[in-house]
Amino acid sequence: MASARVTGTTAAPPGAGRPAARARDWAEIQERMLVPLYEAVHDRLEVGPATSLLGLGCRSGLALLLAAGRGAQVAGLEADDELRALARKRRLRVDPDARTAPDGRTAADGRTEAEVARSAYSLVTVFEQPPPGAEPRRTVAGAARLVLPGGHVVLAAWGPRERCESAAVLDVARRMARRSGAPDPFELSPPGALEDLLAGTGLRPAGGGRVGCPFAYADLESALRGLLSTGLYDAASEFSGPALVAKELEEALQPYLRPDGTVRMTNVFRYLIAERPR
């Protein structure tokens, strides 16, 4: 790809470290990058008025909003207070995420997972990777408990690293975190990794697919703000400082900066559909 000149940004975008600003950056910039994934799943499972859908880790709720636009009854669980508030501004029912508690069963306000969920659903989606410290198998087991017999759980992950141009940009997070550790966004990308999470849950594989999700930004600052809103760079910022992380991230974005100032990276995501037998 053609490169444009370096803009010389040496500090994180304004407000990048504040929870409210970062949540807005996610909702206004980054979340839309995953719309092709959301729509592919909704099309594949014919989401509509007969669907009751629960989004685990739904963030600011765009996937739920799209499903509601198809007539589905939707609800969500989200741990982040600011993201949850933005989802509620979209008039979505989103409660605290029970997966963040030490035992994985109690929400931040003291209710049990069953009390938060209130009922079972025909479709439970896990579009986001589990939060740091959470065990993916426990997340999937929790999703299995919340889906109706004959219903489906959808898991999603990045596709093969070699097919994701954002891989080099995401590597900044792990390199700058050093010994403090940063989550590997491609942990669940290898063949069979998502399927292995179904062991012992009572769910069985029922299809899946790959979806192109290009990351496209109006300019370099938007790219920085959007990527920093994902949370993948938190450990790096704590270890190396947000200004240095932003500088390294800007340099990593240069190959994807176009002459008109926009930034674009092609990526592939994969999803797995699991069914709970009747």
Image: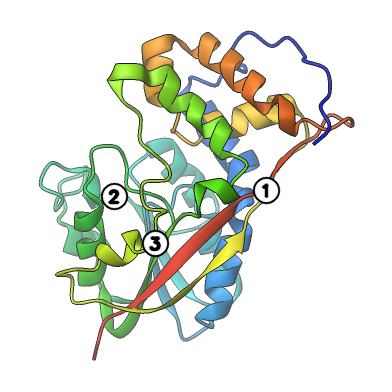
Q: As shown in the figure, which amino acid type bears the numbered disc 1?
A: Thr
Mark 2 or mark 1, which is nearer the start of the sequence? 2
The span from disc 2 to disc 3 (Cα, nearest Å) is 28 Å
Q: Quadrant of the N terminus?
A: top right
The kind of residue on which mark 3 rests is Pro
Task: Find residue 109 and report its horizontal and vertical position in percent.
Answer: 20, 44
Report if the CB atoms under discs 2 and 3 are less than 8 Å apart.
no
Res 134 quadrant in image: top left
Left or right? Give the position of 135 relative to 82: left
Q: Earlier in the sequence, mark 3 or mark 1?
A: 3
Q: Report the disc number at residue 266.
A: 1
Q: Residue at x 69, y 11 (%)?
A: 9
Residue at mark 1 to residue at mark 2: CA–CA distance: 31 Å
Which residue position is annotated with label 3? 191
Residue at mark 2: 97
Q: Nearer the viewer, mark 3 or mark 1?
A: 3
Q: Secondary structure at mark 3?
A: loop
